[in-house]
Amino acid sequence: MRIEIDRRPIWLIIILRSFRPIFFLTIGLIFFYLINLPTPDGLTIQGQRAIALFTVCLILWVTGMLPLAITSLLAIVTVPLLGILDKKETYALFGNEAVFFILGAFILSGAVMHSGLSGRIALAIMNRFGGTPKGLLASIFLLASALSFFMSEHAVAAMLFPIVLDIAKGLNLRPGRSNYAKSLFLALAWGCIIGGVATFLGGARVPLAVGMLKEATGITIDFLEYTVIVFPTVVMLLVIGYLGLTRFFPPDIEDMHLAKTVFERKMKEMGKIGYLEYAVGAVMAATILFWLFFGRSLGIANIAIVSVVGLFILKLVRWKDIEEYVNWGIILMYGGAITLGAAMEKSGAAAWMANAAIGNGISSPLVVIAIFSLLTILLTEGMSNAAVIAILLPVGIGMASRFNMEPRLITYAIAVPAGLAFCFPMSTPANAIAVSSGYITTKDMAKAGIVMMILAWLVFNLTARFYWPIIGIRL
Amino acid sequence: MKQTKTYLHNPGYLKIDLMLKGIRVDKEVLKKANMDKCRNLFDVACGIDVILPHNTWVTVPYIEDFTKDSPYELMERDGRFFITHGDESVQVSVVPTPEFYTLKTTTGIQLSRIGLVHGGYVAITPATQCDFFNKAIECRYCAGNLDIYSNKGRVYSVEDVLETVEAAYKEGKAEIVYISIGFSDTPDGGIEFLKPYIQAIKKHFNTLVAVEALPPKENRWVDETYAVGADSVLYNLEIFNPKLFDEICPGRATLIGRERYLDALRYATTIFPNGTVASHLIVGLEPIESTMSGIDYFTNIGVVPILPIYRPSLGAKLSQYKMPATKDIAPLYGHLYRAVTANKINTTWVRDISIVTTPLEGRFFVGDEARMKTWMQNFYKSRLGLKAAWSLATLRRKLKVKVGESSAHRDK
Ligand code: SF4
């Protein structure tokens, strides 16, 4: 046990400690005030209550004064208590397909990690292409990104981190000084971030957005459709990212034989590929194929859960091994966000808010996309990407119905940029993991990250402007 | 205050004079004062506890030989007690020997061996051991009155200590529990040994705890001392003059060092509340000027100097040392009062000590009435005040102490 005594003056400690009760009291008062305001024209009483609850959740999600999951639970119980939706309907929303898809995806990626398959693939690729500084950099970057197509980007970052750390140590790179080390860790983080937006699997936020859209409007987006729409953005960002890494941090090392030694040692430790890795790999490959080609007819959550059951029937994994990979907090958070989003939509609050916020001033969907993607990409740098979606998407969907816009567009405009958090360690776990190495500082990350964020926003909007119409999306 | 040729009407002077000269008491008076049973307790260095005017507590020797020549006598008239000097007298109260002294723990230990009441404190010594004697580096003024020889290595259990505190608490004698350790050879200064006792006392009683320990090697143990429940801490330097410190306290000097005492005290003032970090400076073992420098130094860094007077004890190496005279040492206490006032040190904590003149009692030497400070002190002695002090101390600890996992733990 480590004991620390706070040596600040007692009055200061008291002021700082009383911040929390004062904060919650203020939140309570804001809520009470909003509930008791005269109901504005065009808004139902349920809508007004939904907005009051949404405001409270927004403040709690942004400030992080309560864990995201707990705010979500608060939202779930308050929706029926305020009479916005009835109890049955509210709790049924929690059983949304997206929630079960996320649960399945967590278990599947946990099984892949636990079997050692992902680590083996990573080592093999790095060993094969890591003969030159740029080759190794590109292989870490592309590998992180490619793995994040299929697994949670956070899990990929955590999995690759020890390997990259060993490489940096093996090459005797100096923490905080070596350009090459900075680029390696940034490649890891950026690879995960960019790859993480490519499919439903990179981060649970895309299923969240899709789930919210479905509950609010009944419209679905399937696995393949999403990937087709986002892929050009991902490819362009990968190219820009690689150029950025080599320009920002030109390699200051030539001899790579020490890195080879690291790979060889690690591969030796792993031994030869076994039955478990083959079997888990096969289940995962089959699952992805089903998602791509039968996602719409069978339902992505159903496919995920059947695969999970398959893993257990084949005894490829035990519950004990998987538990640590299942982030129950995220599952609760998503359930709550979907419920609140649906409450906003069904009560008419979302449309009313969109109208009140933008009015009739905007006519072009491209401007709406530009504004929402900008807001999202800025907010996601400072707060949880899921929280950004939970906050912006209900308003965005309201806006879409207000302007007769296709609601899927606004969903893309929020779901994709919500994952593109390049600037700070707190923006996303991948960044935090990279900075925790000590090889790259927050300042280095922010400098390169800001440029990358601006370029990412431009790329996304250019794709929307020029590519989406080509594949038949009406703007 | 009344000006006479005796000290009878100045409680500050009178307290010192009584401590130095003792008092004559007739057996009958002793009986009436309910003090006679004290004689049967062979292990209690018995003095008679008297409350002088202005609520000034003093333990007055009356058994020792030198008290036969004391000009003071304790008299009783109609159930009231007086201290007389020639034909002058002053009314006082006599504090009867605590009843619990005669009780025993369930394991058969006399409670008075574990805890002794001094004014508003019950002083607990869970272990009667001091390794200095084995190494012949004991403090030269010390006669081993911790029963070091006869009870070497004796450690009382937490349950024994709790029973003692409970008995004292029930009698209203444990406003503050003063828990101390002799010399401890461990880097934590003895706090790890005292920890279970402090925690148990805190768990069972709403009382404040003062801890007398040794300066630990690292400051984190000072943090620990506060965190486990000590409301006040004492690292007793005893002698301020560096040369005399080395000579008189060879054990402390070689095994801890004067600098570490000063550093630990300085650090403790940043952890504990104002007025709760204290250190003894024995009056009479070094020149008055040196003690004065000590007072200045301590008060400057926020430490309360406590000034016990040296009284030669039989068996101590310094038993031939001459006792100081009241008039010679009186300026020290006035100086102490001014120094604590100038440095804005809270005087409510170090109070009601019957064996030492407290800083606030120093006001009697400078003629300051210190109304506000006395009011505060009286308030904190009231039931409400005690509750308030305990609640504030508990709240402060709750706000200040952060417990985390050790780094070794986190690395796992
Ligand atoms: S530390 Fe000094 S005063 Fe205390 S018991 Fe040991 S020798 Fe005596």
Image (cartoon, coloured by chain):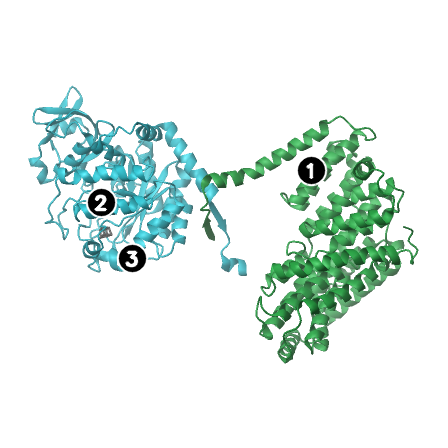
Chain colours: A green, B cyan
Badge 1: few (under 14), some or many (20 or more) residues near its Cα, within 10 Å? Answer: many
Disc 1 from disc 2: Cα separation: 62 Å
Badge 2: few (under 14), some or many (20 or more) residues near its Cα, within 10 Å? Answer: many
Circle 2 is placed at which residue position? B292
Circle 1 is placed at which residue position? A56
Disc 2 from disc 3: Cα separation: 23 Å
Q: Could you say where residue A287 lies in the image, as x and y percent from the top left?
A: 82, 61
The amino acid type found where label 3 is placed reads Ile
* Nearest-to-viewer mark from 1 and 2: 2
Do discs 1 and 2 belong to a common subunit?
no
Chain of the residue on which disc 3 is drawn = B
The amino acid type found where label 2 is placed reads Met
Q: Secondary structure at mark 2?
A: helix
Query: Measuring 39% from the left and 37% from the top, which residue is drawn there?
Result: B205
Pick out the residue farthest to the top.
Answer: B78
Q: Could you say where residue B6 lies in the image, as x and y percent from the top left?
A: 11, 29
Badge 3: few (under 14), some or many (20 or more) residues near its Cα, within 10 Å? Answer: some
Cβ atoms at labels 3 and 1 below 8 Å apart:
no
Chain of the residue on which disc 1 is drawn = A
The amino acid type found where label 1 is placed reads Val
Chain of the residue on which disc 2 is drawn = B
Q: Is B37 situated above or below B180?
A: above
Circle 3 is placed at which residue position? B256
Q: Secondary structure at mark 1?
A: helix
Q: Disc 2 or 3, which lies upstream in sequence?
A: 3
Q: Could you say where residue B130 lies in the image, as x and y percent from the top left?
A: 25, 54
Q: Is residue B105 left or right of residue A109?
A: left
